[in-house]
């Protein structure tokens, strides 16, 4: 089981990876609503990264490879931004929430860190909801190949997570 410090650094790495991937991707997207949502979401995760960086004192953190790959693949597959929004709302967000729940319930008695974990959870939920609000006003995607690619994002995350739990990747 990771220590409080290890979990804080892991979450910092996740937040920072999301911030960078979304920030770099947003200007390349073609759907204006998704451009704005991607910038807003990136900013929210950047703020979480700053909070966690202040707590940990970490200056540099490594990118979370699978997280970066999933987000960048989503952008490369669909330059409208719909796929990266899907990735954040349906693939990354829920898995990040599970990590935050685990961190809150099993890892810490440090009130400051607990507050950071709680705030992180609130931000993830708010971003998923905001993404849903934007998506409901966009044209539906009724393309089986798009849906298969979306499914592949989840598979990629799950396989990497399984491999990491077995100590096969970092």
Image: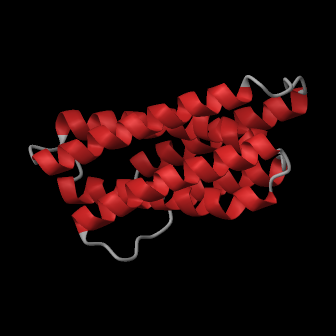
**27 and 101: which is toward the camera:** 27
- Residue 71 visible in the displayed image: yes
| Place of residue 95 in the rendered image (x, y in percent of width and height, measured from the top left) | 47, 36
| Place of residue 113 in the rendered image (x, y in percent of width and height, measured from the top left) | 19, 50
**117 and 26: which is toward the camera:** 26
Query: Which scheme is used to colour this image of the protein?
Result: secondary structure
161 sits left or right of 2 in the view: right
| Place of residue 49 in the rendered image (x, y in percent of width and height, measured from the top left) | 40, 59
Total number of numbered discs in the rendering: 0
Q: Residue at x 24, y 52 (%)?
A: 2
**24 and 105: which is toward the camera:** 24
94 sits left or right of 40 in the view: left
**11 and 135: which is toward the camera:** 135
Q: Is residue 52 above or below residue 74?
A: below
Kindly give the residue lying farthest to the left in the view shown.
109
Q: Is residue 34 above or below residue 145?
A: below
Q: Residue at x 74, y 35 (%)?
A: 150
Q: Residue at x 71, y 56 (%)?
A: 26
Image quarter of residue 85: top right
Q: Residue at x 58, y 43 (%)?
A: 157
99 sits left or right of 164 in the view: left
| Place of residue 119 in the rendered image (x, y in percent of width and height, measured from the top left) | 32, 41
- Where, quadrant-wise, is the C terminus in this rendering? bottom left
Kindly give the residue lying farthest to the bottom in the view shown.
59
- Residue 99 visible in the displayed image: no
């Amino acid at each position: 089981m990771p220590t409080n410090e290890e979990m804080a650094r892991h979450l910092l790495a996740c937040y920072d990876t999301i911030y960078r991937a979304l920030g770099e991707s947003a200007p390349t997207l073609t759907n204006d609503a998704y451009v704005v949502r991607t910038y807003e979401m990136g900013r929210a995760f950047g703020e979480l990264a700053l909070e966690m960086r202040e707590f940990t004192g970490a200056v540099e953190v490594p990118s979370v490879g699978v997280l970066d790959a999933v987000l960048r693949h989503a952008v490369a597959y669909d330059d409208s931004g719909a796929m990266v929004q899907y990735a954040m709302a349906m693939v990354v967000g829920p898995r990040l929430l599970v990590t935050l729940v685990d961190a809150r319930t099993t890892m810490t008695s440090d009130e400051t860190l607990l507050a950071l974990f709680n705030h992180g959870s609130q931000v993830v939920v708010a971003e998923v909801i905001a993404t849903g609000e934007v998506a409901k006003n966009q044209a539906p995607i009724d393309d089986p190949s798009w849906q298969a690619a979306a499914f592949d994002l989840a598979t990629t995350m799950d396989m990497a997570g399984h491999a990491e739990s077995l100590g096969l990747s970092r």
